[in-house]
Amino acid sequence: MKPFEIKKKNKNLEVVAKITDSMVQEYGCRIKYNKKSGQVDLIGDDYCEDIVTEVVTGMMDD
């Protein structure tokens, strides 16, 4: 399969949550998109918030 480009203008929170979840699992953290509320749920200890923030910020950097 060829790699595909993810455009930063895509505002689909569910896609971002799934990508982020796959990147933070190795740290014992999880992030899940809640379809009912339209929000993201962070699952894990307090340090997971910092890890998720760093991963998402890194994804958005040019």
Image: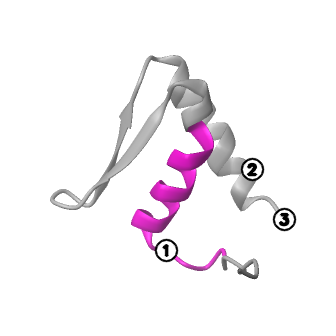
Marks 3 and 2, Cα distance to the nearest angstrom? 9 Å
- The kind of residue on which mark 2 rests is Gly
What amino acid does circle 1 point to? Answer: Lys
The residue that label 2 is drawn on is 58
Q: Which residue is mark 3?
A: 62
Q: Position of residue 29 (x, y in %)?
A: 49, 30
Magenta residues, dominant SS class: helix
**Residue visible at 51% across and 61% down in the picture:** 16
Which numbered circle lies on residue 11? 1
The disc, 1 or 2, on the residue closer to the chain's N-terminal end is 1
Few, some or many C-alpha atoms within 10 Å of disc 2 (few <14, some 14-19, many ≥20)?
A: few
Residue 17 lies within the magenta run = yes
Residue segment shown in magenta: 8-24
Decide which of tag 3 and tag 1 comes sooner along the chain: 1
Return the x and y of residue 59 as percentages of the image width and height: 71, 57
Q: Eyeballing the image, is 50 above or below 45?
A: below
